[in-house]
Amino acid sequence: MQMPEVEREAQIHQILASHRAEIISLVEAVRKLVRDSVPVAEEAAYLGWHGIGYTHPAAGYFCAIFPRRNTVRLAFEFGVLLPDPASLLQGTGKQVRYVDLRPGNAIPVPAIQALIRAALDLPPGRDAKLALLPK
């Protein structure tokens, strides 16, 4: 069940409170990008992770925004499975990949939208995605 918007926004404010205005502004731009790209996505504040996650009704959890000291990280839990023709994805773990966005730099909107669509196109369910990971 989705958290009431007022409570969710209060938690997101709590996550962002310690960050500079430039990081907060960038987080808000990325939130808008994700919500505009996937209007049916549910947004959740993850205080323990210091992030904002997104879940699709059919595809499940597909990405999260993590504000950091000098960047905003848009992470894809199964990013290793995503096509990345713009070479935006970073990371060397078994499954997570992320895009680091910096204040003052343009957000590569079409490339990020393509990553989001690809994440939504993965098989539904965590186990199905885990089965696709390289051994």
Image: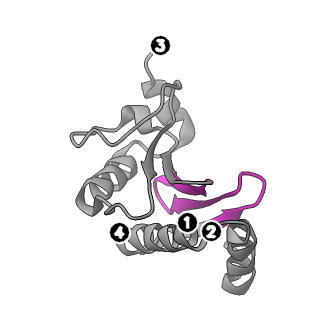
Q: Which residue is mark 4?
A: 37
The answer to which of marks 3 and 1 sits earlier in the sequence is 1
Q: Main secondary structure of the magenta part?
A: strand
Q: Residue 85: name its quadrant.
A: top left
- Within 10 Å of disc 3 (Cα), the crowding (few <14, some 14-19, many 20+) is few
The answer to which of marks 2 and 3 sits earlier in the sequence is 2
Of helix, strand and loop, which one carries label 1?
A: helix
- Within 10 Å of disc 4 (Cα), the crowding (few <14, some 14-19, many 20+) is some
* Colour mapping used in the image: one colour
Q: Which residue is mark 3?
A: 135
- At horizontal 55% and vertical 69% (from top left) the residue drawn is 42
49 with respect to 41 (left or right)? right
The answer to which of marks 4 and 2 sits earlier in the sequence is 2
What label sits on residue 116 in the rendered view? none
Cα–Cα span, label 4 and label 1 = 21 Å
Cα–Cα span, label 2 and label 3 = 41 Å
Identify whether 6 is placed above or below 133.
below
Residue type of the residue flagged with mark 1: Ile
- At horizontal 71% and vertical 86% (from top left) the residue drawn is 6
Residue 5 appears in the rendering: yes
The answer to which of marks 3 and 4 sits earlier in the sequence is 4
- Within 10 Å of disc 2 (Cα), the crowding (few <14, some 14-19, many 20+) is few
Asked whether the beta carbons under mark 1 and mark 2 sit within 8 Å of each other, the answer is: yes
Q: Which residue is mark 1?
A: 23
24 with respect to 9 (left or right)? left
Residue type of the residue flagged with mark 4: Ser
Of helix, strand and loop, which one carries label 3?
A: loop
Spot occupied by residue 49 in the image (x, y as percentages of width and height): 72, 51
- Within 10 Å of disc 1 (Cα), the crowding (few <14, some 14-19, many 20+) is many
Q: Which residue is mark 2?
A: 20
Spot occupied by residue 58 in the image (x, y as percentages of width and height): 46, 58
